[in-house]
Amino acid sequence: MKQFNSIYIIGSGKVAKECYKIAEEFFQQKITYLNDLENLDSFFKNLQNCLIISANNFYIFKKECIQNNTIINYHNALLPNHKGCNAQIWSIWEKDTKTGISWHLVEESIDTGPILIQKAIDLNNSFTSLSLLNTQHKLAITSFKEALCNLKNKKTMIQNNNINKYHKKAALPNEGFLDLSWDKEKISRFLRAMDCGFFNGVKKPKLKILGQEKEILFYQINELDLILNLSDNTILKITKE
């Protein structure tokens, strides 16, 4: 394996922190954890022959940094599916039967680089975006050492980049609005997809009712009813077959 001048990890949350520990043990050298660093463009522009580990990181690496360094990134989908942001939302909304995680090398185009490792998750109707994301994060951590071994051994898999669909950060299913004319399965799928907790700053789903927009704060779906707690303290109970 090539020797890197320095090794950096950039990201937030548990994935980045746990991968930092794993990387230090794997490489047996100091890893620099970049947290809340200002002027990232300037910092990364000056790096040469470094390894950069991107884990839950929304910074887009520039061409010069990518060309002069080795960058690996965690993505919460089975690439090339669901490139871009909020993959956990789209996996549920688009009725995927399987999703997972990918560790991959970074190229100049987003989420297209060679795969170091992928791990799959079977989806069912109990997953929300929040529970799926937590499952993916755990899998990203447990698979990270294997990804580093594959990097060391130059073991990669080229993506099929004929799949060009990319999700922008602001994009949401049906623009974030629940449609009560949908059947029960689609309503459930929408609400579970939009059930993100506080991750990623995703806005709460909305409902247009009586000419007004209301946020859906909480929801409950049982065999007979759909119960929505709305932002004006209204509780809406709907029976769906």
Image (cartoon, rainbow, N blue to C red):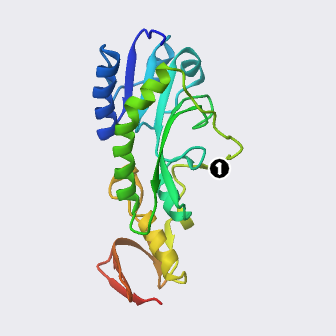
**Residue placed most toward the observer, 1 or 221:** 1
Q: How many marks are shown on the rendered structure? A: 1
**Residue placed most toward the observer, 87 or 23:** 23
Q: Pinpoint residue 229: horizontal percent, then vertical percent.
A: 32, 78
Position of 3 relative to 165 (above/below): above
**Residue placed most toward the observer, 210 or 177:** 177
Residue found at x 63% / y 37%: 159
Position of 142 relative to 149 (above/below): below
Task: State the residue position of label 1.
Answer: 165
Residue found at x 39% / y 48%: 136
Q: Pinpoint residue 100: horizontal percent, then vertical percent.
A: 47, 49
Dot 1 lies on which element? loop
Residue found at x 39% / y 12%: 6
Q: Visible in this render: residue 110?
A: yes
Q: Pinpoint residue 28: horizontal percent, then vertical percent.
A: 30, 14
Q: Amino acid at mark 1?
A: Lys
- Give the quadrant of residue 147: top left
